[in-house]
Structure formats: C-alpha cells, structure tokens
Amino acid sequence: MAWYSTGTAAITQGSTSVQGAGTNWINQQPGWAMMIEGVPGLVEIAAVVSSTELRAAKPINTQTASGLAYAILPTQGLTQKLVEDINKMIAEITNSREAWTSVFSNFSVTAYQLWLDEGNAGTVADFLLSLKGDKGDRGDTGPSVYDQWLAQGNTGTFDQFLDVLSGGAVAATAAARDGAQAAQSAAETAQTDADAAKVSAEASAAQVAADRAAVAQIFDTFDDRYLGAKASDPATDNDGDPLQVGAVYWNTASGGSRFWNGAEWEAPSASAASSAQQAVDAKLAAIAAQAAAEAARDAAQAAALTAADSETAAATSAGAALAAQGASEMARDGAQAALLSVQDVETSVSGLRDQAETARDAAAISSAAAETARTEALQALADAQNDLGLQPVATTGDYNDLINRPEVVDPVAMAIVFGS
C-alpha cells in the first residue's frame, strides 16, 4: 500500500492534535506511523478523529506550524492483523456449515429461493446438502498458478509473483517495513543526537552559569572597591559589608575622591596641601637652622679667639711667675747679705717675707688663672668643634707647666740658720 500524503498538515506545540488541509484521513488506522516536515522521528497515530484530524500518541514538542508536508506509513502490524483475520475467517468457514449459510445468505438467496420454488423444502443447509453429489475420481495434478505464470513468459521469484497478484501490496509492505525500520533507526539516531545535544546544552548551561558567577564575582569585587558618588563618608560598602582598605568614592559635597586607610577616610587633595605646607615649613626651618649654625660657627670662632687671648694671658702670667721667681732669688741673696746686721736682717727678712708671700700669692693666682684659661680654651675649642665640626686645634707642649716655681723662704728659719 502506498504512503498517503495528500494535502498538508498543521501542528500545535505541546498538543497531540494534527490538523489536515485537503486531506481524507478517514481510512487511516491507529498504530500507523506519520512523518511530518520539521518534526524529528515518527509520530504514532493513536486515533483517527475525522478526515482532517488525527490524534498522536504523544504531544508534539516542535514549534507550532502549518502547511507542512507529511506521509502516513502503513505498518507491518496492520498486515499481520489482516492475515490473522483472514485465517480466522477461513477456519470458521471450514469448521461450521452455519458460517457457509451466513455467507451464502448474503449473495445466494436467489438460488435458494429457486430451489424452494421447485417444490423443495428445507433450510439453506438442506439446500447446500442437496447440491453435494457423489465423490468423483481424483483428477490429474496440473501446473501451479506460479508455473502457469512463468509459462506465460513472466520472470521473477515466487515472492515477486505474489507481489504481482497482490497488486504490489507485498512490495509495498516490504518497503513500508524497510521504511519503518529506517525511520526507527533515524529516530534512534535522532534520539542519540538529542541526548548528546542535551548533554552539550547542559554543559553549555553549566559553563554559562559559571561564567555568570565569575562575572558577578568580578563586579562584586569592583563594587566593593569603588563605591561611586556619595554626599558623605560611608560606614560600609555597597553590600553593607565592612569597608576594605583602599576603597574609594567620590564626595559630591567637597568635589574630590576619598580613600579608606583602614581607620578613616583620607582626602588626597587635602593631604597634598598639608604635605606642601609641611614642606614649606621644613624649608623655613632648614633656613633657620642654617642661620643658627652660621651663628654658632661665628660664636665658636669668637670663642676660639677668646681662647687664643686666654692662652696669651696664660703665657704672660707664666712670664710674671718666672719674674717673681727671679725676684725671690734676688731677695734670698739680699737676705744673705743682710745677715751682716741683725737689724737689717730682721728688716730685710720681714720685707722679704712680705715679698715672698706676695710673690707666692701672685704665682698661685697666675697658675690658677693659667689653668682656668687653659680649661676654658679647651672647652671653647671642644664646643666649637661640636657645633661646627671644626678640627681640634693642634697644641704641642704644656705652656703653663711651671717647672721652677719660686720657693717661699721662711725668715725665721733663715734667722736660725744664719743667726740674728
């Protein structure tokens, strides 16, 4: 049987109804398969509603469309059912005379009536029994119908002969079977492809979800760092979470960016102005320090001059001490000369004592002054060295070391030695 494809079909997504235009589906059968343009696989016919409507066994998930080409495939199951019905009918006719009676009652009523009209009486079964004659001899076995078909000049196998007798029904059934098998294979391939596409789609969906999550994470990180424009310092980020060090926002009130340092918001412009002022102050302080250093240097130089003057005074004092020592020696000589006269000696001793005391005091004062001058000079030089980084003044020798200090002569002792 040829595939039926007259007219066009229309489908609705998610529905089992198939609508026809210019179709006559009344002779189609449930269980047959239907191929529809754009619909993957085969559609099983569950019911024939009318000549322009069929019901599919499952909802059709393809997009709604109309004017689609189609073809209805008679399946092997219908042919098998037809064969089974014919075999059943033959068995019933063979085993029941009543079946034959029912058959002839449909198309041989006239012969039975003629038999009755001839004066016979009985049922249709009696009529059939009257037609049965004596069993004759067995005739010769002639050629089969297939052999006679071949004798007429035809060629082909016995299956081909049966196909000719059935008007191509056998070949059509085989073609339908092969087509159904091919369609089933195509459906299985399509299902495999659909499964693979589903797996790929699920993998793509998972990747898209992962990409979206990554983009969302990047945006959230950026949103936590740059808080946008605000009229005042925020206490949290845009998600209500604690502020992160380095977060920044634009202060619309002051018109500048501010950064979170972990404890407070900093304004770079204000910090820059403060740093600039601090730099100016530091420069002024450096200038003042330089002036102070120059003043300290001048003071150190003056102290050095003062130390030099003290050194000169010390040298002068040392000369005076030496002169006093000489005077003391001269007084001792005079005292020895004055021994010639007690009165002169006493007078001389008294005078020499006074002179010796005076000379000793003068020597002691000169020595103390020299030592003090030396100490002050060394301290002034050390202070100057510390303030200005001057090298120590090289000094050699000890200019105030009085080796031959004048000895004080006790007049009483001299009187005892030399006599009065």
Image: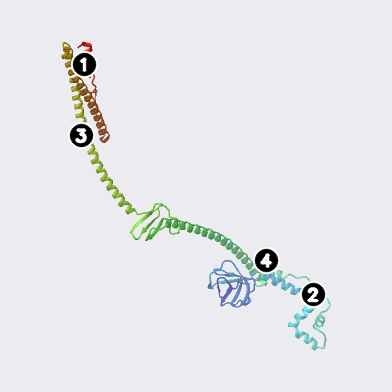
Q: Which of marks 3 and 2 is in front?
A: 3
Q: CA–CA distance between discs 4 and 3?
A: 146 Å
Tell me the crowding category of disc 1: few under 14, some 14 to 19, or many 20 or more residues within 10 angstroms, Cα based: many
Q: Residue 142: x, y in percent?
A: 75, 70
Q: CA–CA distance between discs 1 and 2?
A: 195 Å
- Residue, disc 2: 95
Q: Is residue 77 above or below residue 363?
A: below
- Residue, disc 4: 157
Identified at 48% across, 58% down, the residue is 213
Res 146 → quadrant: bottom right
As helix, strand or loop, the secondary structure at mark 2 comes to helix
Q: Residue 13: x, y in percent?
A: 55, 71
Q: Residue 411 carries which label?
A: 1
Q: CA–CA distance between discs 4 and 1?
A: 183 Å
Name the one closer to the observer, 286 or 296: 296
Amino acid marked by disc 3: Ala
